[in-house]
Image (spheres, rainbow, N blue to C red):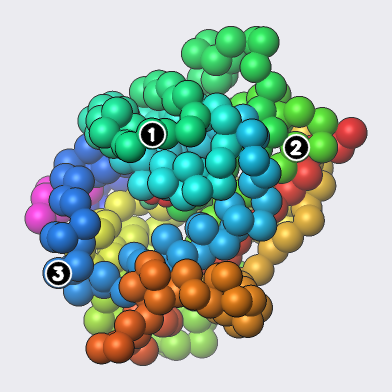
Amino acid sequence: SNKRARSPGHDTKSTEPNVHKQVAEHYNARPDVGVEKRKESTIFRLKSFNNWLKSVLIGRYARPRDKVLDVGVGKGGDLLKWSKAKIQYFVGCDIASKSIEQAQERYRTMRNPPFEAHFHAMDCYSEPISKVVSPDIVFDMVSMQFCLHYSFETEAKARMMLHNVTSQLKPGGVFIGTIPDAYWIVKKLKSESDEGLQIGNSIYSIRFERRDSFEKFGAKYWFHLEDAIDDCPEYLVHFPTFQSLAEEYGLELIYNKKFHQVYEEASQELDFNQLLYRMNVISEDGHLSADEWEAANIYLAFAFRKRQ
Ligand code: SAM
């Protein structure tokens, strides 16, 4: 794998301008392998679980005929979920132009998509989304799955991200997403390794350059997830900072749960329980390994509502 350009020794500052390029290059370099190949992945169950979890979040908050903005849409892996939610209109944005092309292709080959969709390659943390979306459209929902933490490189980027979310949402509209849980990560770092800079197991590792005094923005770590993310610079999202910043932009927190907790609750509900089997999270020949289950809990799910 290509770790050359990403060696941590090369950039110890948190605000170097090329980090967003590294992120885009990283995601552009990952091929869209299709369902059959995905089944061979060592983290097939974990990927299925993350997809199930997003389906739960979408199922809880999306309404038929919604207009949805997906920021950090990637290769469009959630298009089918939005289709099942019977939304009416979809816009997907991502900094990785190849991913955007793949998302477009995925939409084009969908059978009877019930919604109209548009895709834009852009840096959503440095530019206003109003550059690409018509001012006549107000969205019922904004979704940011596994991507918001990249904006916590700087306060300016986090603010542009929140500006983009809130300026596109209607009053009463919902903003959903998934991010790594900084509290869990730092707690684990402090409890597991005496002087170490790294936590992880057989399928993931999180490596820091320093151990103490994490800044509110630019608290960088290197994330590796077997068969998914090579060694990508990411940033801790200090949740109280995120929440109070979101408040400034008129967004009120209505949901905040660790993935394990989402699982415990949603798996009690018949529909979501059946979906666990349909999405191959659980099947006759197995479920998540202990290491995958631990990696699943790196993340939390959130929802905010824009004030009326
Ligand atoms: N949301 C998709 C999903 O759940 O499958 C993709 C998640 S992927 C882990 C993170 C995505 O965030 C990548 O597609 C990456 O290109 C995107 N991203 C990172 N920085 C971005 C930025 N500044 N503007 C837009 N997208 C960005």
At 48% from the left edge and 33% from the top edge, which residue is drawn? 114
Inspect the image, locate mark 2, and give the three-letter code of the amino acid beneath it: Gly
Of the residues under marks 3 and 2, which one precedes in the sequence? 3
Distance in Å between CA atoms under marks 3 and 2: 39 Å
- Relative to 228, is 61 above or below? above
Q: Position of residue 243 (x, y in %)?
A: 74, 51
Q: Is residue 147 visible?
A: no
Q: What range of the chain is rendered magenta?
A: 1-6
Q: What residue is shown with label 2?
A: 173
Badge 2 element: strand
Distance in Å between CA atoms under marks 2 and 1: 27 Å
Q: What residue is shown with label 3?
A: 40
Disc 2 and disc 1 in contact, CB within 8 angstroms? no
Q: Residues within 10 Å of mark 1 (few under 14, many from 20)?
A: few
Q: Is residue 116 visible?
A: yes
Specify whether 45 is left or right of 295: left
Q: Give the label, 2 or 1, closer to the camera.
A: 1
Viewer-proximal residue, 59 or 129?
59
Q: Is residue 251 within the magenta segment?
A: no
- Relative to 98, is 236 above or below? below
- Relative to 138, is 220 above or below? below
Q: Quadrant of the C terminus?
A: top right
Q: What residue is shown with label 1?
A: 112
